[in-house]
Image (spheres, rainbow, N blue to C red):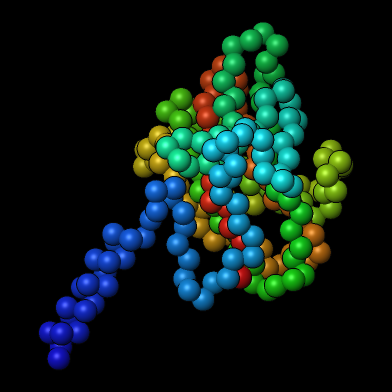
């Protein structure tokens, strides 16, 4: 009986290794988790337009986030590289989520995946995650944007180009009312590369 149990356990482990990922790097969640909000940006397969409800805002410069695709996988992306004399000293460009109602379910957790191109090679070229509780869609400069603990800073010796990195679970359960979260791209244009965001989820 013990030998049989060991064999069953071995098959479960092997099976999980070879079935945990899909071709577009979707995140697998425990069966007890329910998906409240999801965005794969698969509209990028046919159009550079962002999905309904998502907005792009250039705080400095004019370069905006857009949808993109490669190998059958859609994502949001921004390439901040520029050598134009009109480029800002530092590019700050935001990808802002739709409004999320935080009074419908409990225990919300946000997660997503990010990757970068091989041209992201300075510590000044990063993306950061922010959350606002009073953004209406037209009051960017007066909204209270709070930077979360999750920050992707590259280069990272352990992070390869074009390989998605999981954010891990980010606790949103303290929020009530309506929130929006946003990805902020920061970089010196002449020293910047591309960031991609995919598989955004809020589960509970």
Q: Position of residue 33 (x, y in %)?
A: 54, 72
Q: Determine if residue 46 is in view.
A: yes
Figure check: 22 above or below 115: below
Residue 161, image quadrant: top left
Residue at left 46%, top 30%?
Answer: 117
Furthest-front residue in view?
Answer: 46
Q: Position of residue 155 (x, y in %)?
A: 44, 34
Q: Nearer the viewer, residue 161 or 52?
A: 52
Q: Quarter of the image for the C terminus: give it.
A: bottom right
Furthest-top residue in view?
Answer: 85
Q: Position of residue 169 (x, y in %)?
A: 54, 61
Horizontal side of residue 3 vs 131, given as left or right? left
Q: Determine if residue 126 is in view.
A: no
Residue at left 39%, top 48%?
Answer: 23
Horizontal side of residue 141 vs 153, given as left or right? right
Figure check: 14 above or below 96: below
Figure check: 119 above or below 180: above
Furthest-left residue in view?
Answer: 3
Please give the count of numbered marks on the rendered protein: 0
Residue at left 64%, top 72%?
Answer: 107
Residue 95, image quadrant: top right
Residue at left 60%, top 52%?
Answer: 39
Q: Nearer the viewer, residue 201 or 159?
A: 201
Residue 203, image quadrant: bottom right
Q: Position of residue 158 (x, y in %)?
A: 36, 42
Figure check: 16 above or below 194: below
Horizontal side of residue 70 vs 124, given as left or right? left
């Amino acid at each position: 009986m013990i030998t049989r149990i060991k064999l069953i356990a071995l098959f479960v482990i092997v099976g999980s290794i070879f079935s945990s990922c899909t071709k577009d790097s979707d995140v697998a969640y425990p069966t007890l988790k329910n998906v409240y909000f999801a965005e794969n940006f698969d509209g990028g397969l046919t159009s550079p337009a962002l999905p309904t409800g998502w907005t792009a805002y250039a705080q400095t410069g004019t370069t905006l986030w857009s949808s993109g695709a490669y190998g059958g996988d859609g994502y949001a992306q921004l390439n901040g590289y520029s050598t134009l004399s009109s480029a800002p000293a530092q590019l700050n460009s935001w990808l802002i989520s739709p409004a999320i109602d935080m009074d419908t379910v409990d225990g919300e957790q946000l997660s997503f995946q990010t990757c970068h191109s091989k041209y992201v090679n300075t510590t000044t070229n990063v993306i950061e995650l922010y959350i606002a509780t009073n953004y209406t869609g037209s009051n960017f400069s007066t909204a209270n944007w709070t930077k979360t603990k999750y920050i992707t800073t590259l280069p990272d010796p352990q992070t390869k180009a074009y390989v998605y990195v999981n954010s891990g679970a980010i606790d949103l359960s303290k929020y009530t009312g309506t929130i929006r979260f946003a990805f902020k791209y920061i970089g010196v244009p002449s020293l910047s590369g591309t960031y991609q965001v995919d598989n955004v989820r809020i589960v509970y």
